[in-house]
Image: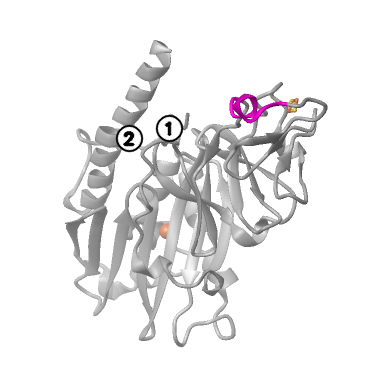
Amino acid sequence: MFKMFPNFWTPVLPVAEIGSDPIAVKLAGESLVLFRSSFGQFAAFIDRCPHRGAPLSHGQVIENGCLECPYHGWQFASNGACTHVPFNSLKAAQLSKLSVVSFPVRVIAGMVWIFTGTENVPEPQLPSSLLESNDRYVIHHEIWNAHWTRAIDISLDYLHIPFVHRDSFGHEFHDPTHRNATAQINVTATADGMAIMNRLDTLPYGVEIDWHQPNQVVLKLDLGGMPLRPHLFAIPINPQQLRFVQVVLPSPGIDRSNFDFDDFFAASQDDRTMTESQVGEIPNMNEGCNVPTDEPSLRFCRWYYSVMKNKEAEGIQDTSVI
Ligand code: FES
Ligand SMILES: [Fe+2]
C-alpha cells in the first residue's frame, strides 16, 4: 500500500470540507474514504468494502457513528472494525475477521492528516508553527498535474522567482541594481530536512525556507516587518498528480481583515504552470548540469533517491513475495 509514499504522516484535506457524508480521496495511488462520525471523530479507510468491494464512499454515516456500506449494509466503526452484518447473527469472533483496512488519523492545523501505513505508527513530528488551534489557519488547496517532487523542488528554490514570477513579485529582481548580483544560498541540515538562507548581495534582506521531510516547505516571509509563515504541502495523488496545499498562520498585523489571502495563494499559479510543464518525478541530478546555488535541490534529490526510491523498491519486493 502507498508504494510511492509509504509510512509518512501527511495532511489530506481541510477539516472544514469534511461534512456528514463520506468523501472519496486519492492518496499516493490508493483510493480512500474519509468521514467524520456523528461523534465528530475522523476516520480513513481503504475505499473498498471487505465483503464484495463496493466503494464505502458511496455509503452513509449512520447515527451510531459507523460507516454503512451501500451494498449490503455492513457497518464499520471508525477504527475499521465491522460492528454489524444485517440478517446474520454473528459472534464477536466472526465479526472481528471482517474489518476494513483503516489508517491512523489526526487533526492538525485545520487539516485531516493520515499516516500512510498501519504498523509502527509514530506520532507526527511537526514544526511548532503547526500547533496553534485548528481554526487559526487559512487554507487553500488545488490539484496540479505534476509529480509531487516537482512542487517541493520549486518551493525550495529561491532563484526561480525572477523568472517564473517575472510578471508579479519577481519583477523587482529585474531592477538594474541586481544586474550583477550574486546569490548566497546557505543550507543547514536539520533533524528532519534542511534550513535554507537565501540572499542576494544587492538586497538588504534574505528569505529563509525550511524543508521538513517528506513533503512540507515553510516559507519564512517578512512583510513590512510582520512575519508570515506559509506552510506548503505537496501531497501525492498518483504519479501524475499532486494536491498543492497552502496553510497560512495569520500573525499579529496580518489577518483576514487586512490581508488578501486569495491574492497571496494565487501567486502559486506561476509555479503550477512551471511544474505542469515538467515531465515525471525530479530526475536524479547527482550527475549533470548543476551550479553552487542548486544545493537545496540537490539535497532534496539525494534524499528522494536514497530514501524514497529505496522504500518504493522494498515495497515492490514485498509485493512480489506475496
Ligand atoms: S459489499 Fe459491502 S456489505 Fe456487501
Ligand atoms: Fe514560486
How many marks overall? 2
Left/right placement of residue 311 relative to residue 295 reads right
Q: Using the image, determine if residue 238 lies above or below residue 157.
A: above
Magenta region, residue range: 90-97
Q: Earlier in the sequence, mark 1 or mark 2?
A: 1
Decide whether residue 146 is among the magenta residues.
no
Name the residue rendered at 38%, 69% in the picture: 129
For the residue marked with disc 2, what is the amino acid?
Answer: Met
Numbered disc 2: secondary structure: helix
Residue closer to the observer: 53 or 148 = 53
Residue 216 on image: x %, y %: 39, 54
Residue at the image position 50 percent from the left and 72 percent from the top: 133
- Which quarter of the figure is the C terminus placed in? top left
Q: Secondary structure at mark 1?
A: loop
Q: Residues within 10 Å of mark 2 (few under 14, many from 20)?
A: some
Is residue 224 rendered to the left or right of residue 103? left
Residue tagged 2:
308
Residue 266 visible here: no
**Ligand 1 - quadrant of the structure image:** top right
Q: Is residue 165 shown above or below 71?
A: below
Q: Using the image, determine if residue 219 lies above or below residue 89.
A: below
Could you tell whether 207 is left or right of 279 in the image? left
Q: CA distance from mark 1 to mark 2?
A: 8 Å
x and y, in percent, of residue 22 in the image? 71, 46
Residue at image mark 1: 4
Q: Which x, y percent locates residue 169?
A: 44, 70
